[in-house]
Image: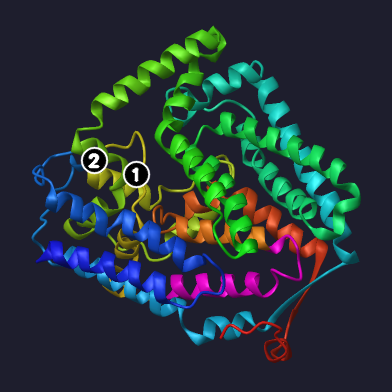
Amino acid sequence: MILLAYLGLVIFIVIFELIRDKQTLIDFLSFFNVLFCLAFPLPGIFLLLSEHSNLNTSILKGTTINLNSFQVPLLIFLTYFFVAIGFHLDSATNSANRIYIKEKNSGHFVFTYALILLLISFSSIVVYSVQNGGLINAISNASLLRSTVIETPQFSLVKRFFLLSFMGSFLISSILFNDKSKGRSIQLLIIFIFSISISLLSFFLIATRANVLRYLLTFYLVYSIRKGKHSLGVVIFFITLLAIISSYGKEIFGSLIYLSDGIDAVTDNFQNSVDANIQSESDPSNVLDEFSAPFFSIFAATNSTYELRLLSDWFYGLASFLPDRIYEAPPTVSYYNTNFLVNTDKYEIPSGFISSCLYSMSWPGLIIFSLSYGWIGRFIQQVTYNHSLEIHWMQYIYVYSALVWSDYTIYADPKILLQTHFWFFISCFFLIVLSSNLFISDKYSIARMRSDK
């Protein structure tokens, strides 16, 4: 019965995605639908179909699961439908339609701003590398830092500025592929290649697959939205590239630990890691540990005893930017979720959206936060969509905002959201403030050139 419920939800989401009206080829709810299915109903289906449905994975050392309980599928169903309802509330589109953004100086400032972002990113990489014994040594230590094997070095604060090169790439690309900039395409192409090179260094220094995937997805999705369709050749290329990064990204970054020993040491370690990964692929527990933390976290949230966190995690997330000597922010929801799941404080497992809502305000919080989450997603989508033709760089903001918004489905920890996407929030804020005028009035909702209907 529960298996049929999960299957029915996945089928419903697929059909709903195919038949519903969308403003673009892929919109915010499309991203949410994909990640929601991967995080919640599909792990349930996998467990119920597996002969190892009672297996004890490494992610379940602190809690137990009861797959026959109706509570978890009910929570999953309620979450999806309230997010979908919030996303389709008229108040979200009406509020967004009151906002009008007009570029100053015909958008000439954007090129200068992109160069400034690239310069800050490159300077941050130089400073960080010098303080860590050179670029090679900094790249070698990246995976060890992520795994907390070694202590965070001095000047680690500058790492937050590495990914400003992303926004620089997006802005240069938006100008380069704009019909009005053909006269200086060679100059822009050189700068665009430079921005990609800086971003590549940032990937190696931060050592996370997610950053690479978001970067590549943004370019592909902007291309697809502009064309209004998926190009088969481009799709095959990007799917192949994304599959390689998803499958072997961890092994690639892990092998770079040996970069200081030479390329041969890197390739040998990479081959050994791939071989070990292939041997372990048949173990269902490895698959579950990799993709199912949000699903398992629901059992932890429903079976554990704790005080409701209300909105404290948002305060702690903002406070995490302060130096510890000024204010040492308490642990956030991921810390407690990890403790409930695996009884450790050596690392953190993000709770996922559903568990985060339960930890905050229990079942009422699930309804309130789901409606609010859907509403905010539609509001941001409408604002960026309304200006995506008039402002050449807005399509990149539209796509990356969708990725950030949908990411919260998996992580649902304000600290992770704010820290991971700090570069996007800060660069986007100054981009809009410095390059545009913002107006809020009812007359703009009446005069919209493109209706949401």
Q: Main secondary structure of the magenta part?
A: helix
**Callouts 1 and 2 close, C-beta under 8 Å:** yes
Label ID, residue 175:
none
Residue 295 falls in which quadrant of the image?
bottom left
Distance, label 1 to label 2, CA atoms, is 9 Å
Does the magenta segment cover residue 256?
no
Q: Residue 7: give x, y in percent of width and height.
A: 21, 63
Let me know if residue 83 appears in the view. Answer: no
Which structural element holds mark 1? loop
Does the magenta segment cover residue 373?
yes
Q: Residue 146: give x, y in percent of width and height.
A: 46, 31
> 312 and 430: which one is in front?
430
Image vertical order of residue 156 relative to residue 81, above or below: above
Q: Which amino acid, mark 2?
A: Ile
Q: Which residue is mark 2?
A: 59
Q: Which amino acid, mark 1?
A: Ile
> In the figure, is residue 117 to the left or right of 335?
right
Which residue is pictured at 46% across the width and 55% down the height? 407
Which residue is pictured at 89% across the width and 47% down the height? 184
The N terminus, quarter of image: bottom left
Q: Which residues are magenta?
A: 370-394
Label 1 neighbour load within 10 Å: few <14, some 14-19, many 20+: many
Q: Farthest residue to the front: give it.
A: 232
Image vertical order of residue 253 relative to residue 303, above or below: above
Q: Which residue is mark 1?
A: 349
Which residue is pictured at 57% across the width and 29% down the height? 204
Q: Residue 214: give x, y in percent of width and height.
A: 54, 47
